[in-house]
Image (cartoon, grey):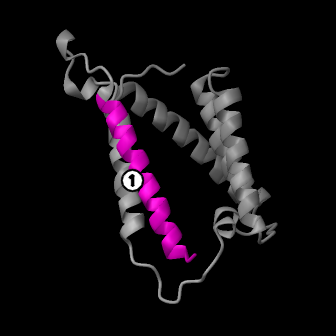
Amino acid sequence: MTNGALDRISGLVFVGLGCLVVWGSWLMPRFEDQGAPVYQAPGLTPGLLGVALAVSGAILALRRGRDGAQTTTFWQNVFGAPQSRRRAGAAVVLTVIYGAVLFGNTPYLVATFLFVTAFVLVFEIGLNSQNRTKGVVRSVIVAIVLGVVTSLGTRFLFETLFLIQLS
């Protein structure tokens, strides 16, 4: 199976998933009978994300593959090279720690700061295949700055735009 064929299959799966998310968000209560404006409907954000997922899936499914695409097995594409497996595993572990351990047990700002900072450090220093010793201090500074900006920025957006109180 070629990479282009796998892209088409994956794209169609994402289109279907996006459509299911849009449908589920449409079924959510809209509180119109209580005088709530449309932009405060709880299904608005998931619906927009579902549309984005479906459009991205359509782009993936319809894009033209490269000429002479390499033929690979399904499992080679899913798991890729050992470096890809380590990166995917690290992303899953960090996300589970954030969602299951940090989020809800620590204040939002602290949990998000720790997650983003750890994510950047793991991928920039821990899993960097170039084994560079120079730039470690720079990577730590960038990770901390990204952690601060992301945690403060997302909190601001959620509390002002979506009207969701975060702890």
- Give the camera-side residue of 166 and 97: 97
- For residue 109, above or below residue 93: above
Residue appearing at x 39%, y 78% in the figure: 64
Residue at image point 33% right, 36% down: 23
Where does residue 160 sit, x and y in percent of width and height?
36, 27
Location of residue 30 (image quadrant): top left
Q: Is residue 35 left or right of residue 46?
A: left
Give the quadrant of residue 107. Answer: top right
Q: Which residues are magenta?
A: 1-26
Q: Residue at x 64, y 32 (%)?
A: 99
Image location of residue 73, percent across then percent down: 66, 72
Q: Is residue 41 above or below residue 23?
A: above
Classify the position of the N terminus by image quarter. bottom right
Q: Secondary structure at mark 1?
A: helix
Residue 121 can be seen, yes or no: no
Q: Residue at x 49, y 72 (%)?
A: 5
- Spot occupied by residue 154 in the image (x, y as percentages of width and height): 47, 35
The residue carrying mark 1 is: 15
Any part of residue 164 in sight? yes
Q: Residues within 10 Å of mark 1 (few under 14, many from 20)?
A: many
Tell me the kind of residue under disc 1.
Val
Judged left or right of residue 62, residue 39 is: left
Near-viewer residue (166 or 21): 21
Count the numbered circles shown.
Answer: 1
Q: Position of residue 163 (x, y in %)?
A: 36, 22
